[in-house]
Amino acid sequence: MEIVCQNCQKKLNVPDEKLPLGKTVSFSCPACKEKITVTREEKSAPPPPPPDQLVSTDEDVKTETFSPDSDKPGAMVCHTDSGPLKALAEKMGYQVHTPGTHAEANKNLRFNKYDLIIITADFEKELHDGLSILQTLQNATMDIRRKTFVLYISPDVKSLNGMQAFALSVNMVLSSDDYAKEGDGVVRMLKPAIAEHELNYRIFFETLVALGRA
């Protein structure tokens, strides 16, 4: 479970087994020594789909796949107007998929490795059957989530707010207004955050290998 210190914004990864469900645990931040209190709550089940919503079969859902010859990292942009964000991700060196529905996004996730996923609130609110792509990522196991940096863009968040990102189980949040104002400037925010994420988990995986656990 990823925890963010409210005082210094230090990101900590605490094994789930050290945070029993329904229990409140307190400990000192190793960086600033401030007290951190966290309660691990069981995720509630997603609401049922609207009764008039059509349910598609998996065979009907389009799937995007990357060329096996490409050495570029993969990204997925989940936005109802994906063009600008796709161009931004391509500018950063990613090969990009742009699913049109949650079903397509979820199927893409099963067949591809994504280093970066960008989700917007308007896409999240699109009608879907089953889990939305954000809910799927929130329920994903840590061995999957550690390998993917997730950016969520919404009018209801404050840009770069660590606690809101933690509550949504994403790596970074950006307000829709700031995204509209920044344009390509979003790259300057994303690059260092992604680099820090990759460094943290590279050290994590190297430690597992050294301990013979990977």
Image (cartoon, rainbow, N blue to C red):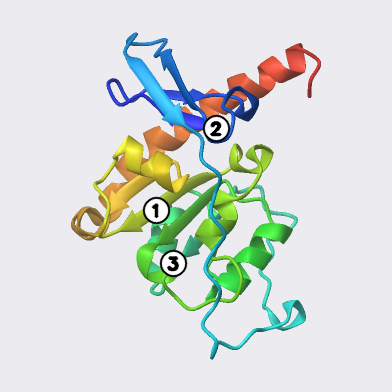
Tell me the tag on residue 124.
3
- The answer to whether 110 appears left or right of 98 in the picture is right
Between the residue at mark 3 and the residue at mark 1, the CA separation in whole angstroms equals 10 Å
Which of label 1 and label 2 is nearer to you?
Answer: 2
Q: Which residue is mark 2?
A: 1
Q: Earlier in the sequence, mark 1 or mark 2?
A: 2
Q: Quadrant of the N terminus?
A: top right
Q: Quadrant of the C terminus?
A: top right
User: Which is more toward the observer, 78 or 165?
Assistant: 165
Residue at (51% x, 82% y) in the render: 50
Which SS class for mark 1? strand
Which SS class for mark 3? helix
Considering every residue shown, the one lying at the far right of the view is: 212
Q: Position of residue 158 (x, y in %)?
A: 24, 47
Tell me the tag on residue 152.
1
Image vertical order of residue 3 relative to residue 176, above or below: above
Q: In the rendered image, is residue 75 in sight?
A: yes
Image vertical order of residue 117 relative to residue 63, above or below: above
How crowded is the residue under tag 1: few (<14 C-alpha within 10 Å), some, or many (20+)?
A: many
Q: Earlier in the sequence, mark 3 or mark 1?
A: 3
How crowded is the residue under tag 2: few (<14 C-alpha within 10 Å), some, or many (20+)?
A: some
User: Which is more toward the observer, 70 or 168?
Assistant: 168
Q: Amino acid at mark 3?
A: Glu
Residue 64: image quadrant is: bottom right
Residue at (59% x, 47% y) in the render: 73
Which of label 3 and label 2 is nearer to you?
Answer: 2
Residue at (65% x, 59% y) in the render: 109
